[in-house]
Image (cartoon, grey):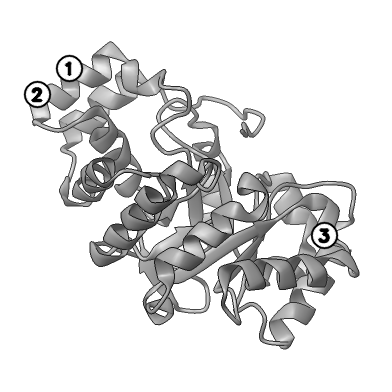
């Protein structure tokens, strides 16, 4: 599987696993854990979660999934904006570490921007890194103007996790070039859309059928073709997980990429950053 490199040289697979909504239904927990573990076995070793997801239960699902294989995964979690202060962030991090049953996060992200000044959040993150609680930090749902506001601290920002898929291509206009110029990967959440509209697209269905792939695989392959992008689809079922994993083996042709551009036109101007 193609690897994506963080500014410090660490490499992760371009296809990881998201966990949004995992942990909400206890009846599905065993299935969710099994899906995550199979994903790890198939090379999808980057796992993304957040304290917001099921109010911490998603992190507990991840803890079960990585039991006995912590050294094989790249673990990402995110914190609420209201916990982004000097006093709140160490406590939020401690809770996440406890739920995940680990001593350190590989990457810790500000989930979205709130009322706490970015400077204060960065100070708290750097303290966590100095204490060995996190290996690196980044942000989520921040646009170019927000990243520029980080000032010198931008060089320590490992990633920006944003909504990016065939339906939401706004980041291609300026955010992706901005991050690429700084060797900063972008993590794409909801890579196959949200609510089913993208996967119901008739034109996408025709292209997928001609390729002998599924619509989700085509949507993922489009993202995986982009330099410096990590896609983190969520799958709580083994069959869906295998479908996602197989997308890593698809290389789209120039003609297929052009056809996707015709169906889902790239941005021609700056657009507000979309988010879920």
What x and y, as percent, mark residue 201? 32, 15
The Cα–Cα distance between marks 3 and 1, rounded to whole angstroms, is 45 Å
Query: Which residue does the numbered mark 3 point to in the structure image?
Result: 84
Apparent side of residue 6 relative to residue 54 in the rendered image (left or right): left
The residue drawn where x is 50% and y is 68% is 75
Query: Which residue does the numbered mark 2 point to in the structure image?
Result: 210
Q: Sequence-wise, which precedes: disc 3 or disc 2?
A: 3
Q: Residue furthest bottom?
A: 131
Quarter of the figure with the N terminus: bottom left
| Tag 2 near tag 1, CB within 8 Å | yes
What x and y, as percent, mark residue 257? 25, 32
Can you say whether 190 is above or below 63 in the image? above
Q: Residue furthest front?
A: 27
Quarter where residue 167 is shown: top left
What x and y, as percent, mark residue 170? 54, 32
Q: Nearer the viewer, residue 220 or 39?
A: 39
Quarter of the figure with the C terminus: top right
Quarter where residue 86 is shown: bottom right
Query: Which residue does the numbered mark 1 point to in the structure image?
Result: 206
Q: Residues within 10 Å of mark 3 (few under 14, many from 20)?
A: many
């Amino acid at each position: 599987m193609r690897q994506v490199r963080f500014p410090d040289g660490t490499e992760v697979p371009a296809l990881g696993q998201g966990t949004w909504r995992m942990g909400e239904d206890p009846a599905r927990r065993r299935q969710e854990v099994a899906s995550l573990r199979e994903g790890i076995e198939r090379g999808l070793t980057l796992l993304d979660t957040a304290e917001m997801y099921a109010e911490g239960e998603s992190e507990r699902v991840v803890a079960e999934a990585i039991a006995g294989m912590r050294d094989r995964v790249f673990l990402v979690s995110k914190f609420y904006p209201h916990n982004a202060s000097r006093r709140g962030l160490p406590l939020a991090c401690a809770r996440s570490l406890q739920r995940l049953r680990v001593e350190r996060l590989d990457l810790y992200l500000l989930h979205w921007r709130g009322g706490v000044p970015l400077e204060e959040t960065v100070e708290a993150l750097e303290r966590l890194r100095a204490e060995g609680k996190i290996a690196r930090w980044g942000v989520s749902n921040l646009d170019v103007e927000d990243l520029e506001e980080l000032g010198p601290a931008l060089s320590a920002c490992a990633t920006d996790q944003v909504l990016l898929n065939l339906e939401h291509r706004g980041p291609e206009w300026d955010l992706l070039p901005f991050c690429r110029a700084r060797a900063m990967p972008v993590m794409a959440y909801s890579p196959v859309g949200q609510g089913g509209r993208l996967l119901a697209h008739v034109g996408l269905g025709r292209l997928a059928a001609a390729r002998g792939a599924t619509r989700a695989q085509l949507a993922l392959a489009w993202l995986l073709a982009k330099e410096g992008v990590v896609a983190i689809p969520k799958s709580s079922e083994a069959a869906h997980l295998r479908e996602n994993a197989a997308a890593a083996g698809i290389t789209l042709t120039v003609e297929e990429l052009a056809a996707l551009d015709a169906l889902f036109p790239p941005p021609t101007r700056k657009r507000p950053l979309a988010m879920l």
